Amino acid sequence: MSGEQTGGTGTVEFLVRPDGTVVGDDGASGALAAALPYAGRLARRMGELVEAGDLRTVQALGVRLLTVGVTWTAAGEGTFRAVLVPLEPRTVPAFMVVGGADTSAAVAHCVSRVLTLEGVVWSSIVTADSRVIAAAGERLDVRFAEVGTRMLAILRTLEGQHATGFVRLTYEGAAMVGASLGRHALVVLASSADDDELVAVIDEVRAILADHDLSAVTTEPDPDAASTDVAEVGSAPEPAPAAAPPLVGARFGRAPTAGRAPGRRRFGSG
């Protein structure tokens, strides 16, 4: 596989092997290729925590769409086949947000709003210091703090290398999405969900929470937070913090699936 890049805006393809060698050019002087195994390990562990099966694809959105197909060896080492394609800028719609709600009420409303989408199993909001300040949906026995800490680490890693505020992880049995809320994150588990509807609700959540300080929401101490493998999550160099850019492209995108019937795309399907 050879890397191809035209004027910094063309399609780029590269492969990261289990031993860390890279075939092709990632267009980022090797930084993106180096980040994928770390993000892949975190994402695979998240799949185990939510009982979604093995990780199959990673998608991240920024100025370009990053799509990564993942295969695993018996020893748990991944091969990452990545494609970067340019996207057209997308205008984020304006929302009229009614003021007056306190931050706790606002985050509770937002996780419930995401839950109204067909196919969403649960949604949560986790702060930069790994506190879960809101969660709604089925299976509330999920270790939200551990899952959220890993999603934050994935978002930060790919934001540093790829300037993205959206990550979608597709597993054998479900999918997860992480969306940056400044330094914090919205984390969603879905069996399926319409792409356009999901993106629209994430835009809405960002608008509602834009003027709220999520770090000010108080929570009870979470025993799950202490069980998170801090050494694993903190093993990658931490990139400089960056504000999440708006989503670009007409749709959230999906991994190619052979034999898919035409019609509305479903988030997390396939």
Image: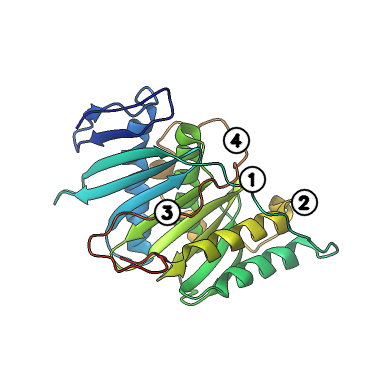
Residue tagged 3: 253
Q: Is residue 128 visible?
A: no
| Residue 132 shown left or right of residue 79 in the figure | right
Say whether disc 4 or disc 1 marks the residue closer to the N-terminus.
1
Q: Residue furthest left?
A: 74
Looking at the rendered structure, the kind of residue marked 4 is Ala
Residue tagged 4: 242
The answer to which image quadrant residue 66 occupies is top left
Looking at the rendered structure, the kind of residue marked 1 is Gly
Assess disc 3: are there few (<14), some (14-19) or many (≥20) residues with their C-alpha within 10 Å of its C-alpha: some
Assess disc 4: are there few (<14), some (14-19) or many (≥20) residues with their C-alpha within 10 Å of its C-alpha: some
| Residue 131 shown left or right of residue 11 in the figure | right
Task: Tell me whether the residue at label 3 lies in contact with that at label 2, contact meaning CB atoms closer than 8 angstroms.
Answer: no
Cα gap from disc 3 to disc 2, whole angstroms:
29 Å
Quadrant of the drawing holding the N terminus: top left
Task: Tell me whether the residue at label 4 lies in contact with that at label 2, contact meaning CB atoms closer than 8 angstroms.
Answer: no
Quadrant of the drawing holding the C terminus: bottom left
Cα gap from disc 1 to disc 2, whole angstroms:
11 Å
Q: Is residue 116 above or below residue 258?
A: below
Assess disc 1: are there few (<14), some (14-19) or many (≥20) residues with their C-alpha within 10 Å of its C-alpha: some
Closer to us: mark 3 or mark 2? 3
Residue tagged 1: 182
Q: Is residue 251 above or below residue 79?
A: below
Looking at the rendered structure, the kind of residue marked 2 is Asp
Please state the horizontal and vertical placement of residue 57, each as a whole percent of the image.
32, 52
